[in-house]
Image: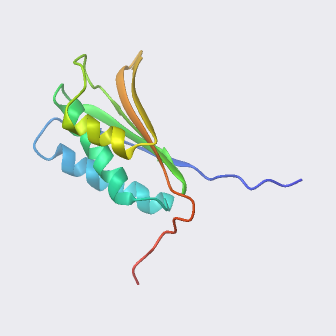
Amino acid sequence: MSHSAIVSIQGEFSVARDAGGVGLAREFAHMFLTRSGYTGSREDVILVASELVANALQHGDVVLRIAGDASRVRIEVTGAGERRHGGWGMKLIAALSTVWGVDDRDTGKVLWSELRAMPGDVLVTET
């Protein structure tokens, strides 16, 4: 019996705590989504990535990791500091994410979010 494999790609980007960090994170997320062929809302993924990065950058430089395929995306931001995470941005992340959370790892605190494309979502490209 043959099974078709889901091809998943991943990328990592170091984000410095400066005025352009969040914008660069959005560009990185956009490039990732183009490569992955994600069929869900790209705007939602880019917004969640930028909110996670903006929240974490309050505490210093961070690493943004994105992995996924056409139907799902996982965003992780490492280096989020020890402060409690809340506020409007985190409410927005909770509303747009399928699931999200905060993990303590050996490498530091990790804010993460997963988003899934809805059944029937189709990638529309401009010609």
Give the image location of residue 20, x and y in percent. Answer: 14, 47
Horizontal side of residue 109 vs 55, given as left or right? right
Residue lying furthest right:
1
Task: Evaluate whether residue 15 shows in this view.
Answer: no
- Count up the numbered dots: 0
Task: Evaluate whether residue 57 shows in this view.
Answer: yes
Give the image location of residue 53, x and y in percent. Answer: 26, 38
57 over 34 or under it: above or below = above
- Which residue corresponds to the image point at 28% horizontal and 50% vertical from the top-left? 47
Horizontal side of residue 17 vs 126, given as left or right? left
Residue 54 vs residue 121, the one in the foreground: 121
- Which residue corresponds to the image point at 36% horizontal and 46% vertical from the top-left? 96
Give the image location of residue 49, x and y in percent. Answer: 32, 44
- Which residue corresponds to the image point at 32% horizontal and 40% vertical from the top-left? 93
116 over 94 or under it: above or below = below
127 over 101 or under it: above or below = below
* Quadrant containing the C terminus in the rendered view: bottom left
Task: Choose top left, top right, bottom left or bottom right for residue 76.
Answer: top left
Horizontal side of residue 9 vs 88, given as left or right? right
Give the image location of residue 81, x and y in percent. Answer: 25, 20
Q: How is the image coloured?
A: rainbow
Residue lying furthest left:
19
- Which residue corresponds to the image point at 48% horizontal and 44% vertical from the top-left? 67
